[in-house]
Image: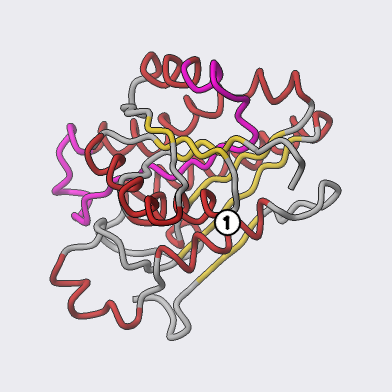
Amino acid sequence: MSKEKPGIWITGASSGIGRAAAIEFAKTGAKVFVSGRRALELERINTELDSDKISVEVFPCNIASHTNVDQTVKKISAISKIDCLINNAGITSFKLAEDNSINEINDIIQTNLLGSIYAIKAVLPQMISNKSGTIINILSIVTKKTFTKSSIYSASKSGLLGYANSLREEVRKYNIKVINVVPGATDTSMWSKDIRNQHSNRMMSGEDIARVLVWTYLQKENLVTEEIVMRPIEGDL
């Protein structure tokens, strides 16, 4: 890591993988900026980090609003440059396609796909100017395997996969890394309590994923791991 502390912006950091990543990156000495809609949950990250005498900067943000995203990036940029964006915010419904309401469809696409694109668009000019930067997209195993009751979620994550792969080819010349992380079942609040109670022993943990994110980010400048697929050792649920 360089002498100047890197700035890491993590979306969807109020729980799950995003929260674990915020804690793990903060422990490396990075300047960590966390966003999400639940400000109280974001603040609780600092309660957990208090004993280590480290903290994260909290920037509540509705990722589904491009105006809100642009405002958030301006606020963060007034403090630090953003060396790494971790696109983690995501929602789902676990319903059959015929049962998804139009509102649910819009919310999932707006958050998972468009929200991630808004965040990328907001940080990209700065990264291009600096001729460096890392964009890590937390995708899903649904981009590799077909599951029922996941049609809209699959559409959103597969759309981001296509966007990210095309983006990577466009920004290589600026020394910007675009990394897709593809986790299988992870023990987070995205799953229902019943599923977690029944299968948590088979799921990966957010902390395990977070450690991989830190390792990936810290790789040498002339190397990029373009895609990482992670599954529970017993396979998909």
When the figure is inspected, residue 22 is found, relative to residue 216, above or below; the finding is above
Give the residue number, with chain letter if any, for mark 1: 213
Q: Nearer the viewer, residue 221 or 77?
A: 77
Number of marks: 1
Residue at 48 percent of width and 73 percent of height: 231
Q: Nearer the viewer, residue 28 or 177?
A: 28
Residue 150 in percent (x, y) is at 30, 55
Colouring scheme, one of rainbow, by chain, secondary structure, one colour: secondary structure
When the figure is inspected, residue 78 is found, relative to residue 200, above or below; the finding is above
Residue at 71 percent of width and 41 percent of height: 177
When the figure is inspected, residue 31 is found, relative to residue 28, above or below; the finding is above
Residue at 15 percent of width and 38 percent of height: 101
Q: Amino acid at mark 1?
A: Leu
Q: Secondary structure at mark 1?
A: helix
Image quadrant where residue 140 sits: bottom left
When the figure is inspected, residue 234 is found, relative to residue 60, above or below; the finding is below
Residue 227 in percent (x, y) is at 64, 56
Residue 72 in percent (x, y) is at 43, 20
Residue count near mark 1 (Cα–Cα under 10 Å), binned few <14, some 14–19, many ≥20: many
Q: Magenta segment, which residues?
A: 75-104
Q: Is residue 203 left or right of residue 136?
A: left
Residue 201 in percent (x, y) is at 31, 83
Q: Is residue 29 left or right of residue 60?
A: right
Residue 153 colored magenta? no
Looking at this rendering, what residue extends furthest in the bottom direction? 234
Q: Is residue 42 left or right of residue 113?
A: left
Image quadrant where residue 91 sits: top left
Q: Nearer the viewer, residue 171 or 73?
A: 73
Residue at 40 percent of width and 45 percent of height: 155
